[in-house]
Amino acid sequence: MRNVYATSIEALIGVLPVVLLLLLFNRFVLRVPLENARETFIGLALTVIGIVLFSNGLKIGLLPLGETVGINLPGHAPMWLVLAFAFVLGFGVTLAEPSLQALGEQIEELSAGIIPKRAMILTVALGIGLGVTMGVIKIIFQIPTSKILLPSLVLIAILMQFAPKAAVGIAFDAAGVTTGPVTVPTIIAMGVGIATALGGRDPLIDGFGLIALCLVGVTFTVLILGMIFKI
C-alpha cells in the first residue's frame, strides 16, 4: 500500500505542473477564454486519475510480469522460441500504445489517405518487433550494442538517400513511439530479466539498449513504407 501511495504521488508531481502551466499560459499569456470549461476540467481530472492508475498498474503488474517472463523464458524454451516470443511481444505491445493510434490517424489525414492508418500502425509494430528480436540476440550472444547499432544507422543513412523527403521525417517521428509508456517498461523489464537469467551477463550492460534498437527498427521499416507508397 505504501508503494501505491508513493507511485501516486510521483505521478501527480509529474502531471499536475504541466496541467497548471497550460491553464496559466492560456489565462495570462494567450488571454483566450476557455471553451467548454466544464468538459475541459473533467477531461483533465480523468487524465490525472488515469495516469495515477496507469503508473501503479505498471509498477505492480506489468513490470514484474515482464521481468518474470524474461527470467524464466530462456530456461524453459529453445532459442528460436525465445526470439519468436520477443518479436511477438514487441509487435503486440506496440499495438496497445495510445500515441501510435494518434500518429496513424494524423499521417492518414495529412497524406490524404495514401498511407492508411492500419498500414502505419502495423509497420511501426513490425519495426519494434524486429528491434526487440535484435536486442535479445544481442543479450544471448553478448554482442556490444554499438556493433549492431552503428551498421544499422549506416543502413538507415543509405535508405534516407532513396526515400521520399516526407518519409524521412515521418520515420524518425514514428520511432518516438518506442519511448511510449507501454512499450518502454515492458521491453526493458523483459530484457533485464533475460540478461539476469542467462548468467554471466551484466543486466546493466546487456539488459539495456533494446529501446535504441527498436528506434532503429521502426525508422528502417517506416522508410521502406515511404518508398513503397512514394509519399
Image (cartoon, rainbow, N blue to C red):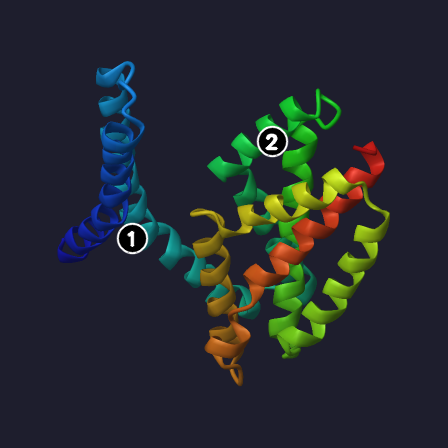
Q: Is residue 63 above or below residue 36?
A: below
Q: Total label count?
A: 2
Residue 101 at what x, y percent from top left? 54, 32
Residue displayed at 45% across by 61% down: 189
- Give the crowd class for mark 2: few <14, some 14-19, many >=20 residues within 10 Å: many
User: What secondary structure is marked by label 2?
Assistant: helix
For residue 60, which numbered disc appears in the image? 1
| Nearer mark to the viewer, of 1 and 2 | 2
Residues marked 1 and 2 touching at CB (< 8 Å)? no
Q: Is residue 147 above or below residue 76?
A: below
The reply to whether residue 41 is visible in this rendering is: yes
For residue 213, which numbered disc appears in the image? none
- Give the crowd class for mark 1: few <14, some 14-19, many >=20 residues within 10 Å: some
The residue labelled by disc 2 is 104
Task: Determine the residue located farthest toward the top in the rendered image.
Answer: 36
Q: Nearer the viewer, residue 28 or 184?
A: 28
Q: Is residue 183 above or below residue 116?
A: below
The reply to whether residue 96 is visible in this rendering is: no
Task: Determine the residue located farthest toward the right in the rendered image.
Answer: 162
User: Which amino acid type is marked by label 2?
Assistant: Gly
Residue displayed at 72% across by 28% down: 115
Q: Is residue 74 left or right of residue 19?
A: right
Residue 97 at what x, y percent from top left? 49, 40
Q: Is residue 81 above or below residue 126?
A: below
User: Which amino acid type is marked by label 1?
Assistant: Ile
User: Which quadrant is the C terminus positioned in?
Assistant: top right
Q: Is residue 12 left or right of residue 178?
A: left
